[in-house]
Amino acid sequence: MNLWEFLLHHRAEVLTLTLEHLFLVGVSTGIAILIGVPLGILLTRWPSASKPILGFANVMQTVPSLALFGFLIPLNIYLFQIRLVGGIGARTAVVALVLYALLPIVRNTFTGISGVDPAIREAGKGMGMTGRQLLFQVEIPLALGVIIAGVRVATVISVGTATIAAAIDAGGLGRYIFRGLRMNDNTLILAGAVPAAVMALAADFLLGWVERVFGRGVGGWLRSWRTWITLGAIVLALAVWLALAISPAKTGDRIAVGSKDFTEQIILGELVAQAIENKTGLEVQRRFDLGGSLAHEALLAGEIDLYVEYTGTALTAILKLPPLSDPKEVYRRVKDEYAARFGLEWSEPVGFNNTFAILVRGADARRLKLKTIADAARYAPKWRAGFGQDFMSRPDGYEGFARSYGLKFSELREMDLSLTYRALVDGQVDLIAGNSTDGLIARHDLFQLEDDRRYFPPYDAVPVVRQETLKRRPELRAALQALGGLISVEEMRQLNFEVDGARRAAKDVVDEFLRKKGFDPGSAQGAKGGA
Amino acid sequence: MAEADRQAIDFRGVSFRLPNGRTLLHALDLQVGAGETLVLLGRSGCGKTTTLKLINRLLDPTGGEVVIEGKRTTDWDPIRLRRRIGYVIQEIGLFPHFTVEDNVGVVPRLEGWEGEKIRARALELLEMVGLDPERFAARYPRELSGGQRQRVGVARALAADPPILLLDEPFGALDPITRREIQAEFRSLQKRLCKTMVFVTHDVGEAFLLASRIALLKDGKVVLLGKPADFLASREPEVQAFVACLANPDSSAGAA
């Protein structure tokens, strides 16, 4: 399907995502103007503060978005009854975008007002203008072109950065881009990137025009401070109204299920959600696609009630403990630590282990009668190996792997993970390290060699739940127990393939799988929910 | 003291020192009578502009006192004081984002006049300074020549009919011919208006044309204070240096 067909076919969804995107950019830029312009003016009155404040705004721009989200999600800042900062969703996305947009606005306001000719300022003073009259009648109108230029820069940057909102379930065109990257689907990436680019160009053009108009001098009505206060009040009212509109806080009895931002996680999120709907009849809110470690942050903050985590990831990446090789021991360890430290409970493992999979072509495995990695070690000197950047660099990756099995390849090639499969299939390399649940393994007749020396730490998939939620809704426990040991590695591969390879919706794939496993979708009310 | 009270502007031992310690004015004593035009003459950096800014309180004296209409400037509300004093500076002082009419109407608008009254006053003043209101009222300063801008500057200073007018090298940036024309027009305007004026210039010809009295400043001190005739008679070297320029007008036409 080419881009044009895709956009036409999904026009309703494209429109929704575009509007979401526009909304994020509009609200955040509006708020950034309300904060940034007065702040910039204040700095001209109090120049000694300009260095630290502009420095702060500068630093904010360099903070990676996922790090910023990780910092913002656990915060709980309320004004009256309205939560201003914290949680996942549009609110936090807007806060982050505001922080990114502040610098150009504050800086340009400061520069614009400082740049007003001192002779003109003195003429105003000499005419007997008060400080406020001078500001609203002379300084702001003369600096307006520069201030609008700052707003223009901030808006164009925001259109780009708003794509990251998809990482915290805040919608926008980033959804297509992230989904496309995950599925290695260029059409999908373009379906997000092209409308965003068009939006950026349109904003740039429009504000460029406004800038030229106001740079020339402004009409009488713009010289009254009342006009400016009124304009500010209108923008503020709009922002508050929108902010209220976008905070559908998690309501009492819904169970919020989260997921990380790759296909398997979305399938598992859907699986848990449907199982809960099926077994308990509770209403489930799906908050998928959370980037990086944001699912964990959101769980701690109570924004979601559960998501599926991997034991090895929890042990090393979250708890920062040294790796262990015994799956049972890892499970016990993370279960104890999570209960003690976070008030989170690890339920039954789902059944499969998503670890690194050392893969060879099925034909080679049969011909050479290979079962384990140790079996393959003696052929290695004649083989070329292809590994992803991640595997080459991580502590439980290539170096220890090669040492532990005494491997030496004739050639070692580092490339993008998704390309290693193609290279193996095409015979350009003979051994790769993939993920054990990857759908491509089944599709291309690849064989996973057994890690007989147990070098790779176990990554068993297990739902992690807030203890608080279990206390409030004890019936959840039964639903989660029903998932225990439900999915083998081969089944997970198949499910991943259905979504990534056959391009089916996760919701349908999971529904079909659960029926096959004896879940009766008719047995509970409210079983189906939109993904 | 009865004598001093009749002065519109009275400098009593006024000094002005910058925060960095440099003294710009040393114990200045000057009086300007009502309706009189005092020209402050001197080289660049001699303290002329500083003296002017002490009158409308853009600066406060660091020693002595400046008395305006019987009241120390430090006792005046600066905003009220400035609105009683018209202020003309070189053409750059016009607000570039205001039309000519709006520029002229600035002080009346600050004073809260009615819109119609402001408009009528602005048009009347444009007429007075020799600019056709029909043609010029809606233009922006950038669309005017230097001489036209200067006329607008004078009209703006006169708008609220202030009793005192301060002019800081108002014609300094004009070409010699335009300057001569506008000086002549200003001379006749001056006679009609009967305002107290303090006029800063480094052009000795201009000083002789417009002054009731001339104060020659050098290094923040008054070298000579007197009528133009006293000026010609003086043997003071700084005065003679300026008189020499009068004999050779081209040399005074230079930059500010």
Image (cartoon, coloured by chain):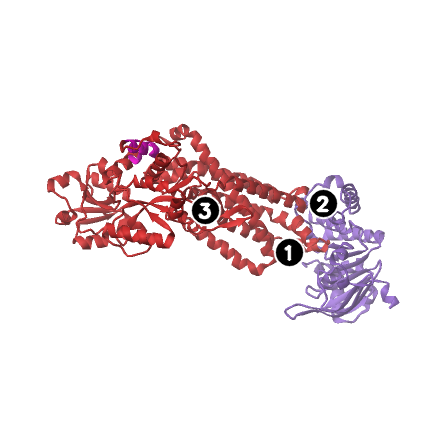
Chain colours: A red, B purple
- Mark 2 residue element: helix
Chain of the residue that carries numbered disc 3 in the rendered image: A
Query: How would you classify the magenta stretch by its main secondary structure?
Result: helix
Q: Residues within 10 Å of mark 2 (few under 14, many from 20)?
A: many
Mark 3 lies on residue? A87
Magenta region, residue range? A499-515
The kind of residue tagged 1 is Pro
Question: Of tags 3 and 1, which is closer to the observer?
Answer: 3
* Residue that appears at 42% across and 47% down: A302
* Residue that appears at 33% across and 40% down: A478
The kind of residue tagged 3 is Gly
* Residue that appears at 33% across and 34% down: A506
The magenta stretch spans residue A506? yes
Mark 2 lies on residue? B102
- Asked if A10 appears above or below A230 in the picture, the reply is above
Q: Please state if B58 lies on the left or on the right of A175 as rendered.
A: right
Alpha carbon distance from label 2 to label 3:
52 Å
